[in-house]
Image (cartoon, grey):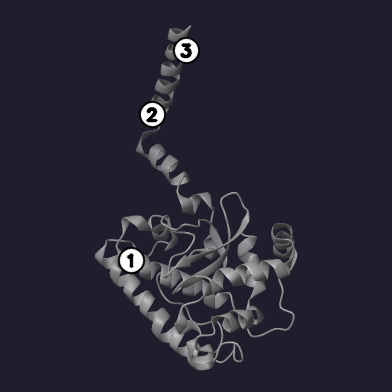
Amino acid sequence: MENNNSRRKFLKNTVQVAAIITAGSAGVSSLLASCSPTNSLAIPPAFLTGFNQQPLPYAYDALENVIDAKTMEIHFSKHAAAYSKALKEAATAEGIDATKPLENVLAKISKYSVKMRNNAGGHYNHEMFWKSMQPKKTDNKPTGNLAASIEKTFGSFANFKTQFSDSAKTRFGSGWAWLYVDAANNLKIGSTPNQDNPLMDKSDIKGFPILGLDVWEHAYYLKYQNKRADYIENWWNVVNWSYTETRFNKK
């Protein structure tokens, strides 16, 4: 009986290997690509990120009373611009095609240099961050499918805000807090150090980010000094929930 079972297993494995060989290199490439973090998340073209810095979607003073104009100007024109510049330098040095989506790099960031990791993450995170904010609104809350999923996952919007804020407050040193959708399409909260994000294969949290909060000191120090908690509390007033929901509804 054992010999018959072993023979059947051997034949099954042989057939599977033969099928892959028959498919040729294109078939193997397709199989491997289907297992990559980026493809498993099925990111639509509208959300793919390039290597160039895009214009800020509002004036530097548009978020005043929450984020001051001087901070926005320095943050966008100095810090974020430097990430894009250094990213393209690293891409040239490491033979990366900068006409392809940046997500392709993030999904296998462990293969690249520290310079690539820091600046690819820095560029991606900031390009998303600017779009995730809008001029201050009263009673600023999500709606539709995202609101329903937040309620289901966290019990209430208030509970979600508390958990997300705690994640941002307790991120030691510099980094980001995230609301993201994992591969099973579940909403999750987490944080990453430095300029890492959930799309990276080296990240402790993995998924498609739909909302991110920058808690590097340069994002808030001119106005809030060491009061990160105040910055986080006020930031909720400028979250662009419409944009966040479009990312959530991507599938």
The mark that comes first in sequence, 2 or 3, is 3
Percent position of residue 147, x then y: 72, 65
**Residue 139 in the image: above or below residue 172:** below
Image-quadrant location for residue 84: bottom left
Of the residues shown, which amino acid type is indicated by label 1?
A: Met
**What residue sits 35% from the left and 56% below the top?**
110
Distance in Å between CA atoms under marks 3 and 1: 50 Å
Residue neighbourhood size for the residue with mark 3, other residues' Cα within 10 Å, grouped as few (<14), some (14–19), many (≥20): few
Of the residues shown, which amino acid type is indicated by label 2?
A: Thr
Return the residue nearer the eye: 212 or 160: 160
Residue with the mark numbered 3: 5
Q: Which mark is residue 116?
A: 1
Quarter of the image that includes the C terminus = bottom right
Distance in Å between CA atoms under marks 1 and 2: 37 Å
Q: Is residue 251 visible?
A: no
* Cβ atoms under marks 1 and 2 closer than 8 Å: no
Image-quadrant location for residue 213: bottom right
Percent position of residue 20, x then y: 40, 31
**Residue 18 in the image: above or below residue 86:** above
> Left of 208 or right of it: where is 6?
left
Q: Which mark is residue 22?
A: 2
Secondary structure under tag 1 reads: helix
